[in-house]
DNA sequence: GCGATCAGCT
DNA sequence: CACAGCTGATCGC
């Protein structure tokens, strides 16, 4: 639960996710998503009075959040004050003090947060530096490196402060299985049950919150059915969700709720009380967050908890590793927790967050082109020698970085979180996506892909004595099998990112919307938008409709197994446009060239 | 009567 | 396996 009080020290004239007390005087409001703990005071009478007496104050949020907020009558009074902003469209806003007329300019960019429909992070760029407020988020390892607006000129932007979702920023919550792994397991469980007979039904014991929609949609796709929910109103302009949920009780998959749900299910009756109790066989699945320690395998993502009852892993928040990866990549000057993890204290989480902060001024992190490396160093040295033992270790590529970053821990998986994406390279600087890249850019990529790729290479080319490898392969095979079983009479299943992007023009045909250019002269975002007041516009959550196609998977990846853990993203802040993932053979060639000191810009 | 807060529960 | 949020009791305005 968020305990963020609403204001950031750099920009105290705005309030985020909090609408009471001191926040009553904000010049602008920002809502990251529509969970209640981020909406404190949003319907308070004092705030209503404030809005009525003001002509300038606005609430900025994503178009999906606007829909969700206004789907409740209690929030309808906000309608005239909401300014929906598209994702990844930097927008300048003026923060005007209505008493004095004094104004402050701020550029805000919404970034996908992967927490629930409409959830975003806010990047603020202004006179007091760049500040990132994450709201709640679930991003996988490496996702941050692919977020275009966190980069500039081929590098990570200089971030002063990050106000971060620290829900699981505690080493106890070291890793959480990926979204794809969890959803696949639930799909299997549901499939096995409902295939037994038409009277076998599943009840998903979901908490009253947005965030399970991609699960409902996936189940609807897999089994050509709809999930029974209590209320469709909130999805009325989201056809991709609407087509997989229903208020009709005669379906085998339910996510309906009742105050005494538990009792009903124990009696083999559903919360919606459909059927005659004795006829139905109800399987209860309770999505819950499960976490795993550093050396434990995240394999059991569903656990039997009783007769016809399971818990299934499901998390709206990033794990310790994922948060650490996120912050270690951004290297902000300061980090502030938005949440105190269960069983921890504010002091403890703050202390641990500080360890991810920048240790030296950025000038010390100057990039040294790979050409400056001593050629005598061989690949073996680069990959096997502990950094401490080798004064020429690859950490030396960056002055000061070796000291700034935590030392590599003993390997526990092929993608250890401490294998940092050190060089802060922009996503476009990859050899396979930028064929015209300069040798320096290619070199940059080779460094940027860090040790994890080198380890992958070693895994591909050496006999592997890692105890985990066999299990990993088995896991990959299992997941391939599950992917093979996918497919649906309704077409391609939507992917996770569909629930976090929105096309306000109901573009279902795959055309890309023109991206609104960044315009410092833009005085107010609302004046530029045609659909702001269009009550009948649909908000499509479609595969191809978003205007940030750089998030999309390359088609060639479609048949790959999903990631077995957090090692890669199933959120799909994916490859650079038109890119292809290099094959192990291609990587092997590149690494051999690197080791031999060959010109990397020459094609094979 | 309404809002704020908290305990209890899932 | 710890999220998110509902309900009901209590208190104050």
Image (tube, coloured by chain):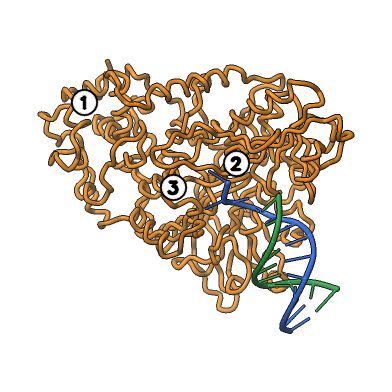
Chain colours: A orange, B green, C blue
Seen from the viewer's position, the closer of residues A243 and A98 is A243
Give the answer, above or below, for where A240 lies relative to A530: above
Residue displayed at 58% across by 17% down? A484
Residue A22 visible in image: yes
Residue farthest front in this picture: A307
Q: Which residue is mark 2?
A: A500
> In the rendered image, which residue does mark 3 sit on?
A320
Quadrant (top left, top right, bottom left, bottom right) of the C terminus of chain A: top left
| Mark toward the viewer: 3 or 2 | 3
Q: Mark 3: which secondary structure? A: helix
The residue located at (40%, 21%) in the rendering is: A470
Chain letter of the residue beneath label 2 in the structure image: A
Query: Residue shown at 52%/66% (left/top)?
Result: A7
Mark 1 falls within which chain?
A: A
A56 above or below A567? below
Which quadrant does the N terminus of chain A fall into? bottom right
Q: Which residue is mark 1?
A: A594
The image shows residue A481, relative to residue A285, as above or below, that is: above
């Amino acid at each position: 639960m968020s305990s963020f009080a609403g204001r950031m020290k750099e920009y105290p004239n705005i309030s985020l996710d909090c609408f009471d007390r001191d926040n009553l005087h904000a010049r602008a409001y920002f809502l990251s998503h529509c969970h209640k703990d981020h909406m404190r005071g949003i319907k308070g009478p004092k705030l209503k009075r404030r809005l009525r007496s003001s002509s300038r104050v606005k609430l900025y949020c994503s178009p999906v959040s606007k829909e969700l907020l206004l789907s409740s009558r209690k929030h309808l009074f906000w309608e005239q004050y909401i300014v929906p902003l598209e994702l990844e469209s930097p927008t300048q806003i003026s923060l005007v003090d209505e008493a004095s007329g004094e104004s402050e300019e701020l550029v805000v960019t919404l970034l996908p947060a992967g927490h629930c429909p409409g959830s975003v992070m806010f990047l603020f760029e202004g006179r007091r530096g760049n500040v990132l407020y994450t709201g709640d988020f679930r991003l996988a390892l490496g996702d941050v490196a692919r977020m275009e607006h966190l980069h500039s000129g081929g590098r990570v932007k200089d971030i002063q402060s990050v106000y971060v979702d620290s829900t699981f920023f505690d080493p106890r919550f070291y890793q959480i299985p990926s979204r794809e792994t969890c959803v696949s397991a639930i799909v299997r469980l549901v499939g096995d049950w409902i295939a037994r007979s038409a009277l076998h039904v599943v009840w998903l014991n979901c908490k009253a919150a947005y965030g399970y929609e991609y699960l409902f949609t996936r189940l609807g796709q897999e089994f050509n059915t709809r999930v029974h929910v209590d209320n469709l109103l909130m999805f009325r302009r989201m056809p991709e969700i609407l087509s997989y949920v229903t208020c009709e009780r005669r379906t085998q998959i339910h996510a309906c709720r009742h105050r005494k749900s538990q009792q009903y299910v124990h009696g083999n009756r559903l919360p919606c009380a459909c059927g005659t109790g004795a006829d139905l066989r109800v399987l209860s699945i309770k999505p819950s967050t499960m976490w795993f320690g550093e050396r434990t395998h995240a394999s059991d993502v569903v656990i039997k908890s009783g007769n016809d009852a399971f818990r299934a892993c499901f998390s709206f928040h990033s794990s310790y590793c994922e948060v650490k990866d996120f912050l270690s990549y951004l290297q902000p000057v300061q980090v502030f927790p938005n949440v105190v993890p269960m069983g921890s204290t504010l002091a403890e989480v703050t202390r641990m967050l500080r360890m991810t902060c920048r240790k030296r001024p950025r000038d010390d992190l100057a990039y040294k082109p790979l050409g400056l490396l001593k050629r005598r160093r061989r690949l073996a040295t680069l990959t096997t020698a502990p950094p401490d033992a080798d004064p020429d270790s690859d950490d030396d590529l960056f002055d000061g970085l070796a000291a700034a970053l935590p030392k590599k821990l003993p390997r526990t998986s092929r993608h250890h979180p401490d294998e940092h994406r050190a060089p802060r390279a922009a996503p476009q600087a990859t050899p396979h996506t930028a064929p015209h890249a300069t040798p320096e850019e290619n070199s940059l990529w080779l460094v940027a892909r860090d040790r994890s790729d080198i380890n992958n290479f070693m895994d591909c080319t050496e006999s592997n004595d890692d105890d985990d490898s066999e299990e990993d392969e088995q896991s990959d095979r299992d997941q391939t099998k599950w992917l093979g079983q996918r497919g649906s009479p309704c077409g391609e299943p939507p992917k996770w990112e569909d629930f976090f992007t929105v096309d306000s023009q109901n573009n279902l045909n795959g055309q890309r919307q023109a991206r609104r250019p960044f315009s410092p002269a833009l005085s107010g975002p609302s004046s530029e938008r045609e659909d702001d007041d269009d009550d009948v516009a649909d908000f499509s959550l479609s595969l191809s409709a978003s205007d940030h196609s750089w998030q999309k998977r390359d088609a060639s990846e479609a048949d790959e197994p999903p990631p077995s853990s957090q090692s890669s993203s199933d959120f799909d802040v994916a490859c650079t446009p038109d890119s292809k993932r290099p094959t192990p053979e291609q990587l092997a060639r590149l690494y051999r060239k690197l080791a031999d000191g060959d010109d990397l810009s020459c094609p094979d």
